[in-house]
Image (cartoon, rainbow, N blue to C red):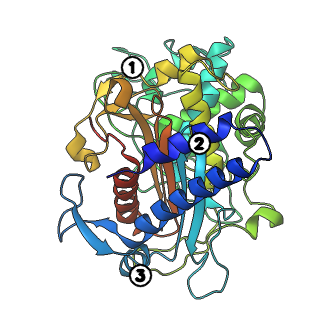
Amino acid sequence: MTRTPVIVACVAVVSLLPANTALRAQVQKAVGSAVQRQIRSIENALVEFPPGATARGQETAQQVTLAERMAALHVPGVSVAVINDGAIEWAKGYGLVKAGEPARVTPDTIFEAASTTKLVATVIALRLVEQGALSLDEDVNARLKSWKVPENDLTTVQKVTLRRLLTHQAGINRPDGGIGFTPGRVPTLVQVLKGAEPAENKPAVVESVPGSKWAYSNFDFLVIQLLIEEAVGKPFAQAAREMVFQPLDMTSSTLSHPVDATLRRRTIVPHDENGTAHDRPMHPAALAQGGLLTTPSDLGRLAIELMRATQGQSNRVLSRKTVLAMMKQEVALDPNQFGGFVSGQGLGTFLMGQGQNLAFLHPGSNVPGATCLLIGFPALGKGAIIMTNAAGGELLMAQLALTIQREYGWPLGQ
Protein backbone atom coordinates (compact mmCIF):
# COMPACT_ATOMS: atom_id res chain seq x y z
CA MET A 1 0.00 0.00 0.00
CA THR A 2 1.46 3.34 -1.06
CA ARG A 3 1.36 6.60 0.86
CA THR A 4 2.17 8.62 -2.23
CA PRO A 5 -1.34 10.09 -2.77
CA VAL A 6 -1.25 11.54 0.75
CA ILE A 7 2.13 13.15 0.14
CA VAL A 8 1.12 14.55 -3.25
CA ALA A 9 -2.06 15.98 -1.74
CA CYS A 10 -0.06 17.64 1.03
CA VAL A 11 2.37 19.13 -1.49
CA ALA A 12 -0.56 20.50 -3.47
CA VAL A 13 -1.99 22.12 -0.33
CA VAL A 14 1.39 23.69 0.46
CA SER A 15 1.54 25.28 -2.98
CA LEU A 16 -1.81 27.00 -2.39
CA LEU A 17 -1.02 28.44 1.03
CA PRO A 18 0.36 31.95 1.59
CA ALA A 19 4.04 32.15 2.49
CA ASN A 20 5.26 32.27 6.09
CA THR A 21 2.09 31.03 7.75
CA ALA A 22 1.86 28.64 10.67
CA LEU A 23 -0.46 26.43 8.62
CA ARG A 24 2.07 26.19 5.82
CA ALA A 25 4.73 25.13 8.32
CA GLN A 26 2.44 22.45 9.75
CA VAL A 27 1.68 21.02 6.31
CA GLN A 28 5.37 21.02 5.36
CA LYS A 29 6.16 19.19 8.59
CA ALA A 30 3.48 16.60 7.81
CA VAL A 31 4.90 16.07 4.33
CA GLY A 32 8.38 15.62 5.78
CA SER A 33 7.13 13.12 8.33
CA ALA A 34 5.34 11.07 5.67
CA VAL A 35 8.50 10.93 3.55
CA GLN A 36 10.59 9.87 6.54
CA ARG A 37 8.15 7.04 7.20
CA GLN A 38 8.55 5.84 3.63
CA ILE A 39 12.33 6.00 3.88
CA ARG A 40 12.29 3.95 7.10
CA SER A 41 9.97 1.41 5.47
CA ILE A 42 12.36 1.01 2.55
CA GLU A 43 15.40 0.71 4.82
CA ASN A 44 13.83 -1.82 7.17
CA ALA A 45 11.77 -4.11 4.92
CA LEU A 46 13.49 -4.80 1.63
CA VAL A 47 11.88 -6.99 -0.97
CA GLU A 48 13.82 -10.26 -0.95
CA PHE A 49 14.55 -12.93 -3.57
CA PRO A 50 14.41 -16.60 -2.54
CA PRO A 51 17.61 -18.62 -3.18
CA GLY A 52 18.18 -18.98 -6.91
CA ALA A 53 15.62 -16.31 -7.85
CA THR A 54 16.89 -13.12 -9.44
CA ALA A 55 14.00 -11.81 -11.53
CA ARG A 56 11.04 -9.56 -10.87
CA GLY A 57 7.97 -11.63 -10.04
CA GLN A 58 9.99 -14.08 -7.94
CA GLU A 59 10.48 -11.78 -5.00
CA THR A 60 8.88 -12.18 -1.59
CA ALA A 61 8.02 -9.83 1.26
CA GLN A 62 10.69 -10.10 3.95
CA GLN A 63 11.65 -8.14 7.05
CA VAL A 64 15.25 -7.85 5.86
CA THR A 65 17.00 -4.50 6.27
CA LEU A 66 19.09 -2.63 3.76
CA ALA A 67 22.09 -2.89 6.07
CA GLU A 68 21.67 -6.68 6.26
CA ARG A 69 21.52 -7.04 2.49
CA MET A 70 24.54 -4.79 2.00
CA ALA A 71 26.53 -7.00 4.38
CA ALA A 72 25.34 -10.25 2.81
CA LEU A 73 26.13 -9.06 -0.73
CA HIS A 74 29.48 -7.45 0.27
CA VAL A 75 28.34 -3.99 -0.83
CA PRO A 76 30.13 -1.34 1.29
CA GLY A 77 28.27 1.70 -0.08
CA VAL A 78 24.91 2.65 -1.62
CA SER A 79 23.37 5.95 -2.65
CA VAL A 80 19.72 6.55 -3.59
CA ALA A 81 17.69 9.44 -4.97
CA VAL A 82 13.91 9.09 -5.30
CA ILE A 83 11.85 11.18 -7.71
CA ASN A 84 8.23 11.86 -6.82
CA ASP A 85 5.76 14.40 -8.19
CA GLY A 86 8.38 15.49 -10.75
CA ALA A 87 11.09 16.39 -8.22
CA ILE A 88 13.78 14.72 -6.16
CA GLU A 89 11.85 13.96 -2.97
CA TRP A 90 14.80 12.59 -1.03
CA ALA A 91 18.39 11.46 -1.47
CA LYS A 92 20.42 9.46 1.02
CA GLY A 93 23.72 7.60 1.28
CA TYR A 94 24.49 4.41 3.19
CA GLY A 95 27.68 2.68 4.22
CA LEU A 96 31.30 3.34 3.29
CA VAL A 97 33.12 4.90 0.36
CA LYS A 98 35.80 2.21 0.74
CA ALA A 99 35.62 -0.91 2.88
CA GLY A 100 37.69 -0.65 6.05
CA GLU A 101 38.03 3.14 5.91
CA PRO A 102 35.99 5.71 7.84
CA ALA A 103 34.64 7.91 5.02
CA ARG A 104 30.89 7.42 4.78
CA VAL A 105 28.63 7.66 1.74
CA THR A 106 26.51 10.82 1.59
CA PRO A 107 24.18 12.13 -1.14
CA ASP A 108 27.20 14.09 -2.44
CA THR A 109 29.42 11.01 -2.81
CA ILE A 110 30.34 10.42 -6.45
CA PHE A 111 29.78 6.96 -7.99
CA GLU A 112 30.50 5.35 -11.36
CA ALA A 113 27.47 5.48 -13.63
CA ALA A 114 28.91 2.66 -15.77
CA SER A 115 26.66 1.95 -18.78
CA THR A 116 24.12 4.53 -17.64
CA THR A 117 26.68 6.89 -19.22
CA LYS A 118 25.11 5.84 -22.52
CA LEU A 119 22.04 7.92 -21.67
CA VAL A 120 24.20 11.07 -21.55
CA ALA A 121 25.87 10.14 -24.85
CA THR A 122 22.43 9.64 -26.38
CA VAL A 123 21.24 13.08 -25.31
CA ILE A 124 24.32 14.72 -26.84
CA ALA A 125 24.02 12.78 -30.10
CA LEU A 126 20.32 13.56 -30.47
CA ARG A 127 20.93 17.23 -29.74
CA LEU A 128 23.41 17.24 -32.62
CA VAL A 129 20.76 15.56 -34.78
CA GLU A 130 18.38 18.40 -33.91
CA GLN A 131 21.08 20.88 -34.93
CA GLY A 132 21.72 19.08 -38.24
CA ALA A 133 25.29 18.14 -37.31
CA LEU A 134 24.43 14.42 -37.28
CA SER A 135 21.80 12.27 -38.98
CA LEU A 136 19.98 9.27 -37.53
CA ASP A 137 19.72 7.24 -40.70
CA GLU A 138 22.72 7.93 -42.92
CA ASP A 139 25.85 5.77 -43.14
CA VAL A 140 28.06 6.95 -40.26
CA ASN A 141 31.13 6.56 -42.47
CA ALA A 142 29.87 9.60 -44.39
CA ARG A 143 30.59 11.68 -41.24
CA LEU A 144 33.53 9.88 -39.62
CA LYS A 145 37.00 11.19 -40.51
CA SER A 146 39.84 9.79 -38.38
CA TRP A 147 38.42 6.25 -38.36
CA LYS A 148 35.66 4.53 -40.26
CA VAL A 149 33.63 1.40 -39.60
CA PRO A 150 35.54 -1.34 -41.47
CA GLU A 151 33.61 -2.40 -44.55
CA ASN A 152 32.97 -6.07 -45.27
CA ASP A 153 30.39 -8.30 -46.99
CA LEU A 154 27.87 -7.52 -44.22
CA THR A 155 28.06 -3.74 -44.67
CA THR A 156 27.36 -4.09 -48.38
CA VAL A 157 23.90 -5.35 -47.39
CA GLN A 158 23.12 -2.61 -44.85
CA LYS A 159 25.07 0.29 -43.38
CA VAL A 160 25.85 1.25 -39.81
CA THR A 161 23.73 4.28 -38.86
CA LEU A 162 23.41 6.36 -35.71
CA ARG A 163 19.92 4.92 -35.10
CA ARG A 164 21.35 1.40 -35.21
CA LEU A 165 24.22 2.37 -32.93
CA LEU A 166 21.81 3.90 -30.40
CA THR A 167 19.65 0.77 -30.43
CA HIS A 168 22.44 -1.85 -30.39
CA GLN A 169 21.53 -3.01 -33.89
CA ALA A 170 24.71 -1.95 -35.70
CA GLY A 171 26.10 -5.50 -35.80
CA ILE A 172 29.33 -4.41 -34.11
CA ASN A 173 31.06 -6.63 -31.54
CA ARG A 174 30.90 -5.85 -27.80
CA PRO A 175 34.11 -6.26 -27.45
CA ASP A 176 34.99 -9.47 -25.60
CA GLY A 177 37.42 -8.91 -22.73
CA GLY A 178 36.40 -5.30 -22.15
CA ILE A 179 38.38 -2.14 -22.84
CA GLY A 180 41.45 -2.12 -20.64
CA PHE A 181 44.67 -0.12 -20.62
CA THR A 182 47.98 0.03 -18.79
CA PRO A 183 48.60 3.24 -16.80
CA GLY A 184 51.31 5.22 -18.55
CA ARG A 185 50.31 3.75 -21.95
CA VAL A 186 46.96 5.38 -22.65
CA PRO A 187 45.47 4.70 -26.11
CA THR A 188 43.47 7.25 -28.05
CA LEU A 189 39.84 6.62 -28.91
CA VAL A 190 40.83 5.78 -32.49
CA GLN A 191 43.44 3.27 -31.24
CA VAL A 192 40.73 1.67 -29.09
CA LEU A 193 38.41 1.36 -32.10
CA LYS A 194 41.23 -0.05 -34.22
CA GLY A 195 42.41 -2.38 -31.44
CA ALA A 196 45.89 -0.93 -32.07
CA GLU A 197 48.66 -0.60 -29.48
CA PRO A 198 48.71 0.57 -26.79
CA ALA A 199 45.01 -0.40 -26.71
CA GLU A 200 44.48 -3.81 -25.10
CA ASN A 201 41.16 -4.68 -26.69
CA LYS A 202 40.09 -6.35 -29.91
CA PRO A 203 39.15 -4.02 -32.81
CA ALA A 204 35.62 -2.90 -33.59
CA VAL A 205 34.24 -4.95 -36.47
CA VAL A 206 30.82 -5.63 -37.97
CA GLU A 207 29.84 -9.22 -37.20
CA SER A 208 26.22 -9.29 -38.38
CA VAL A 209 24.19 -7.43 -40.97
CA PRO A 210 23.43 -3.96 -39.53
CA GLY A 211 19.79 -3.77 -38.51
CA SER A 212 19.27 -7.54 -38.52
CA LYS A 213 19.35 -8.18 -34.77
CA TRP A 214 19.80 -6.67 -31.31
CA ALA A 215 23.16 -7.31 -29.60
CA TYR A 216 24.40 -5.10 -26.76
CA SER A 217 27.68 -3.42 -27.72
CA ASN A 218 29.93 -0.97 -25.88
CA PHE A 219 31.70 -0.31 -29.19
CA ASP A 220 28.45 1.12 -30.58
CA PHE A 221 28.75 4.00 -28.13
CA LEU A 222 32.45 4.54 -28.74
CA VAL A 223 31.59 5.05 -32.41
CA ILE A 224 28.94 7.53 -31.23
CA GLN A 225 31.59 9.24 -29.08
CA LEU A 226 33.83 9.68 -32.12
CA LEU A 227 30.89 10.99 -34.18
CA ILE A 228 30.20 13.57 -31.45
CA GLU A 229 33.82 14.64 -31.03
CA GLU A 230 34.33 15.12 -34.76
CA ALA A 231 30.98 16.91 -35.17
CA VAL A 232 31.66 19.48 -32.43
CA GLY A 233 35.46 19.62 -32.65
CA LYS A 234 35.79 19.10 -28.89
CA PRO A 235 36.59 16.25 -26.51
CA PHE A 236 33.57 14.22 -25.45
CA ALA A 237 33.98 15.26 -21.80
CA GLN A 238 33.79 18.93 -22.78
CA ALA A 239 30.76 18.36 -25.02
CA ALA A 240 28.98 16.62 -22.14
CA ARG A 241 29.82 19.44 -19.75
CA GLU A 242 28.57 22.16 -22.11
CA MET A 243 25.52 20.39 -23.56
CA VAL A 244 24.21 18.42 -20.58
CA PHE A 245 25.88 19.04 -17.22
CA GLN A 246 25.89 22.85 -17.23
CA PRO A 247 22.33 23.33 -18.58
CA LEU A 248 20.99 20.90 -15.96
CA ASP A 249 23.16 22.08 -13.05
CA MET A 250 24.82 18.66 -12.76
CA THR A 251 27.75 20.07 -10.80
CA SER A 252 28.96 16.70 -9.44
CA SER A 253 29.30 15.04 -12.84
CA THR A 254 32.41 14.56 -14.96
CA LEU A 255 33.79 12.51 -17.83
CA SER A 256 37.33 13.85 -17.44
CA HIS A 257 39.92 11.31 -16.33
CA PRO A 258 42.02 11.35 -14.26
CA VAL A 259 39.59 13.13 -11.96
CA ASP A 260 40.66 16.39 -10.35
CA ALA A 261 41.61 16.28 -6.68
CA THR A 262 38.43 18.00 -5.44
CA LEU A 263 36.10 15.42 -7.00
CA ARG A 264 38.45 12.53 -6.28
CA ARG A 265 38.06 13.08 -2.53
CA ARG A 266 34.30 12.52 -2.93
CA THR A 267 34.52 9.48 -5.22
CA ILE A 268 33.85 5.85 -4.29
CA VAL A 269 36.25 2.94 -4.74
CA PRO A 270 34.82 -0.10 -6.60
CA HIS A 271 34.70 -3.50 -4.90
CA ASP A 272 34.49 -7.02 -6.34
CA GLU A 273 31.95 -9.70 -5.44
CA ASN A 274 33.87 -10.47 -2.23
CA GLY A 275 33.85 -6.84 -1.12
CA THR A 276 37.57 -6.35 -1.87
CA ALA A 277 38.47 -2.81 -2.96
CA HIS A 278 40.16 -2.15 -6.32
CA ASP A 279 41.21 1.49 -6.56
CA ARG A 280 41.90 1.49 -10.30
CA PRO A 281 41.85 4.38 -12.80
CA MET A 282 39.09 4.64 -15.38
CA HIS A 283 39.86 4.72 -19.10
CA PRO A 284 40.78 8.29 -20.08
CA ALA A 285 39.76 7.96 -23.76
CA ALA A 286 36.96 5.39 -24.05
CA LEU A 287 34.18 7.25 -22.24
CA ALA A 288 30.73 7.13 -23.81
CA GLN A 289 30.13 3.48 -22.96
CA GLY A 290 30.72 3.83 -19.21
CA GLY A 291 33.02 6.63 -18.06
CA LEU A 292 30.64 8.95 -16.21
CA LEU A 293 31.25 9.84 -12.57
CA THR A 294 28.20 11.39 -10.91
CA THR A 295 25.71 11.26 -8.05
CA PRO A 296 22.15 9.90 -7.98
CA SER A 297 20.86 13.45 -7.53
CA ASP A 298 22.68 14.66 -10.66
CA LEU A 299 21.31 11.74 -12.67
CA GLY A 300 17.94 12.57 -11.15
CA ARG A 301 18.17 16.05 -12.68
CA LEU A 302 18.72 14.48 -16.09
CA ALA A 303 15.83 12.03 -15.60
CA ILE A 304 13.50 14.83 -14.49
CA GLU A 305 14.45 16.95 -17.49
CA LEU A 306 13.64 14.10 -19.88
CA MET A 307 10.34 13.47 -18.09
CA ARG A 308 9.41 17.16 -18.22
CA ALA A 309 10.34 17.29 -21.91
CA THR A 310 7.90 14.47 -22.72
CA GLN A 311 5.15 16.62 -21.19
CA GLY A 312 6.22 19.69 -23.17
CA GLN A 313 7.30 21.43 -19.94
CA SER A 314 11.00 21.91 -20.75
CA ASN A 315 13.49 21.78 -23.62
CA ARG A 316 16.78 22.68 -21.94
CA VAL A 317 18.62 19.83 -23.68
CA LEU A 318 16.19 18.24 -26.15
CA SER A 319 12.82 19.01 -27.71
CA ARG A 320 9.65 17.16 -26.80
CA LYS A 321 9.59 15.52 -30.24
CA THR A 322 13.11 14.15 -29.81
CA VAL A 323 12.57 12.84 -26.28
CA LEU A 324 9.36 11.12 -27.35
CA ALA A 325 11.37 9.47 -30.14
CA MET A 326 13.89 8.29 -27.51
CA MET A 327 11.08 6.57 -25.69
CA LYS A 328 9.46 4.96 -28.72
CA GLN A 329 10.18 1.24 -28.96
CA GLU A 330 12.59 0.40 -31.77
CA VAL A 331 13.15 -3.23 -30.76
CA ALA A 332 11.07 -5.60 -28.63
CA LEU A 333 13.18 -7.41 -26.02
CA ASP A 334 12.52 -10.49 -23.93
CA PRO A 335 11.92 -9.36 -20.33
CA ASN A 336 13.33 -12.68 -19.09
CA GLN A 337 16.75 -11.60 -20.34
CA PHE A 338 16.69 -8.57 -18.07
CA GLY A 339 15.30 -9.83 -14.79
CA GLY A 340 11.80 -8.77 -15.77
CA PHE A 341 12.63 -5.07 -15.87
CA VAL A 342 13.01 -4.42 -19.62
CA SER A 343 10.65 -5.08 -22.52
CA GLY A 344 11.97 -2.85 -25.28
CA GLN A 345 14.79 -0.72 -26.66
CA GLY A 346 14.34 2.93 -27.53
CA LEU A 347 16.93 5.38 -28.81
CA GLY A 348 19.70 4.96 -26.25
CA THR A 349 17.40 3.86 -23.47
CA PHE A 350 15.56 0.74 -22.35
CA LEU A 351 11.78 0.72 -21.98
CA MET A 352 9.18 -0.97 -19.80
CA GLY A 353 5.39 -0.75 -19.81
CA GLN A 354 3.35 1.44 -22.12
CA GLY A 355 1.07 4.45 -22.25
CA GLN A 356 0.74 6.28 -18.93
CA ASN A 357 2.75 3.52 -17.28
CA LEU A 358 5.72 3.73 -19.64
CA ALA A 359 9.12 3.84 -17.94
CA PHE A 360 12.55 4.52 -19.40
CA LEU A 361 15.55 3.04 -17.66
CA HIS A 362 19.23 2.28 -18.00
CA PRO A 363 21.32 -0.03 -15.83
CA GLY A 364 25.09 0.03 -15.57
CA SER A 365 27.83 -2.20 -14.20
CA ASN A 366 31.58 -1.59 -14.29
CA VAL A 367 34.25 -4.19 -13.52
CA PRO A 368 35.41 -4.96 -10.84
CA GLY A 369 32.32 -3.62 -9.12
CA ALA A 370 30.33 -0.40 -9.47
CA THR A 371 26.66 -0.35 -10.44
CA CYS A 372 23.92 2.09 -11.36
CA LEU A 373 20.22 1.98 -12.18
CA LEU A 374 18.13 4.89 -13.45
CA ILE A 375 14.39 4.54 -13.92
CA GLY A 376 11.75 7.15 -14.64
CA PHE A 377 8.00 7.21 -15.36
CA PRO A 378 7.45 10.37 -17.47
CA ALA A 379 3.66 10.56 -17.23
CA LEU A 380 3.69 9.87 -13.49
CA GLY A 381 6.64 12.03 -12.43
CA LYS A 382 8.12 9.11 -10.49
CA GLY A 383 11.49 7.39 -10.54
CA ALA A 384 14.72 6.61 -8.76
CA ILE A 385 18.46 6.37 -9.22
CA ILE A 386 20.38 3.75 -7.26
CA MET A 387 24.18 3.52 -7.27
CA THR A 388 26.52 1.13 -5.45
CA ASN A 389 30.26 0.56 -5.19
CA ALA A 390 30.38 -3.24 -5.49
CA ALA A 391 29.60 -6.12 -7.85
CA GLY A 392 26.91 -7.37 -5.46
CA GLY A 393 25.10 -4.11 -6.10
CA GLU A 394 23.43 -5.59 -9.20
CA LEU A 395 21.12 -7.75 -7.08
CA LEU A 396 20.80 -5.10 -4.37
CA MET A 397 19.65 -2.51 -6.92
CA ALA A 398 16.87 -4.83 -8.08
CA GLN A 399 15.75 -5.32 -4.48
CA LEU A 400 15.81 -1.60 -3.77
CA ALA A 401 13.94 -0.76 -6.98
CA LEU A 402 11.18 -3.24 -6.13
CA THR A 403 11.00 -1.94 -2.57
CA ILE A 404 10.68 1.65 -3.78
CA GLN A 405 8.01 0.43 -6.20
CA ARG A 406 6.09 -0.99 -3.27
CA GLU A 407 6.23 2.31 -1.36
CA TYR A 408 5.57 4.64 -4.28
CA GLY A 409 3.15 2.58 -6.33
CA TRP A 410 5.21 2.24 -9.49
CA PRO A 411 3.30 0.32 -12.19
CA LEU A 412 6.25 -1.89 -13.15
CA GLY A 413 5.55 -3.77 -16.37
CA GLN A 414 1.90 -2.69 -16.61
Q: CA distance from mark 1 to mark 2?
A: 55 Å
At 64% across and 29% down in the image, what residue appears?
124
Q: Secondary structure at mark 1?
A: loop
In percent of width and height, residue 159 lies at 42, 17
In percent of width and height, residue 26 lies at 65, 54
Front position in the image: 222 or 118: 118
At 25% across and 46% down in the image, what residue appears?
340
In the rendered view, does 274 fall on the left or right side of 267?
Answer: left
Q: Amino acid at mark 1?
A: Thr
In percent of width and height, residue 358 lies at 37, 30
Name the N-terminal-most of marks 3 and 2.
2
- Residue topped by disc 3: 71
Q: Secondary structure at mark 2?
A: helix
Q: CA distance from mark 1 to mark 3?
A: 49 Å
Name the N-terminal-most of marks 1 and 2.
2
Picture quadrant of residue 316: top right
At 48% across and 40% down in the image, what residue appears?
382
- Classed neighbour count for the residue bearing mark 1: other residues with Cα under 10 Å, few (<14), some (14–19), many (≥20): some
Disc 3 versus disc 2: nearer the observer: 2
Front position in the image: 411 or 155: 411
- As drawn, the label of residue 47 is none
In the rendered view, does 56 fall on the left or right side of 256?
Answer: left
- As drawn, the label of residue 11 is 2
Q: Secondary structure at mark 3?
A: helix
- As drawn, the label of residue 155 is 1
Picture quadrant of residue 357: top left
